[in-house]
Image (tube, grey):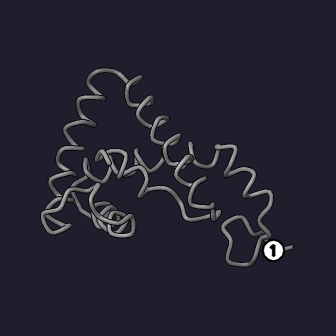
C-alpha cells in the first residue's frame, strides 16, 4: 500500500459501519478524490504538501518501529496519525487536518456511505443523533 493511500485509509471515519469489501471500495474512491484535489492545487501548495508528507512519513516510520506506514494494520496507522495531529509543529498539524478534511468530505459524499447512513438506525451515541 502506498503511503498516501495508507494515510487516507486511516483517516476514514468508522461510522457508518460498512462491510469490508465496500469499505475497501470507498477507501479507494476517497484516495482518488484526495489525490485529485492535491493534483489540482497550485504548484506551491502541492510542493508544500509533498514536503510535509515526507516529514510525516519519516515521523510515522519512527513511530511505527521502523516499519513503513502501509505495512502496519489500520488501527496502528490511525494511532500514528492521532499522535501526529497532536504535535505542536503547525505545518505538520495543518497537513493532517487538510488531508482529514478532504477525506471526510469524500467519505460522507460517497453513495455507499450515504446509503449506509440512510439504513442505519440512530442511537444516542451516533454522531447525527439529535434529541427531540
User: Which residue reaches farthest right?
Assistant: 132
Examine the image and state in which quarter residue 40 appears. Answer: top left
- Identify which residue, 85 or 27, lies in the foreground: 27
The secondary element bearing badge 1 is classed as: loop
Task: Using residue 15 as the reference point, say whether residue 57 is left or right of it.
Answer: left
- Residue at x 23% of width, y 61% of height: 88
79 is higher (above) or lower (below) than 33? below
User: Which residue reaches farthest bottom?
Assistant: 124
Task: Using residue 26 as the reference point, say whether residue 6 is left or right of it.
Answer: left
94 is higher (above) or lower (below) than 15? above
8 is higher (above) or lower (below) than 15? above
Disc 1 residue crowd, few under 14, some 14–19, many 20+, Cα 10 Å: few
- Identify which residue, 63 or 91, lies in the foreground: 63
40 is higher (above) or lower (below) than 114? above
Mark 1 = which residue? 131
Examine the image and state in which quarter residue 66 appears. Answer: bottom left
- Residue at x 67% of width, y 52% of height: 113
Q: Position of residue 117 (x, y in %)?
A: 73, 58
Placement of the C terminus among the 4 image quadrants:
bottom right
Q: Position of residue 109 (x, y in %)?
A: 65, 43
What count of labels does the image hold? 1
- Residue at x 23% of width, y 29% of height: 47
Q: Position of residue 10 (x, y in %)?
A: 41, 58
Q: Position of residue 17 (x, y in %)?
A: 63, 65
Amino acid at each position: 500500500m502506498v503511503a498516501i493511500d495508507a494515510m487516507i485509509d486511516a483517516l476514514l471515519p468508522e461510522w457508518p459501519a460498512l462491510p469490508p469489501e465496500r469499505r475497501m471500495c470507498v477507501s479507494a474512491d476517497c484516495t482518488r478524490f484526495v489525490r485529485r484535489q492535491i493534483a489540482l492545487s497550485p504548484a506551491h501548495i502541492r510542493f508544500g504538501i509533498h514536503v510535509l508528507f515526507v516529514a510525516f512519513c519519516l515521523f510515522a516510520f519512527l513511530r511505527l518501529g521502523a516499519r513503513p506506514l502501509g505495512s502496519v494494520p489500520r488501527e496502528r496507522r490511525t494511532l500514528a496519525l492521532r499522535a501526529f495531529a497532536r504535535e505542536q509543529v503547525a505545518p505538520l498539524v495543518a497537513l493532517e487536518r487538510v488531508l482529514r478534511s478532504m477525506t471526510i468530505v469524500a467519505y460522507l459524499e460517497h453513495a455507499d456511505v450515504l446509503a449506509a447512513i440512510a439504513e442505519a438506525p440512530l442511537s444516542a451515541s451516533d454522531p447525527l443523533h439529535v434529541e427531540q
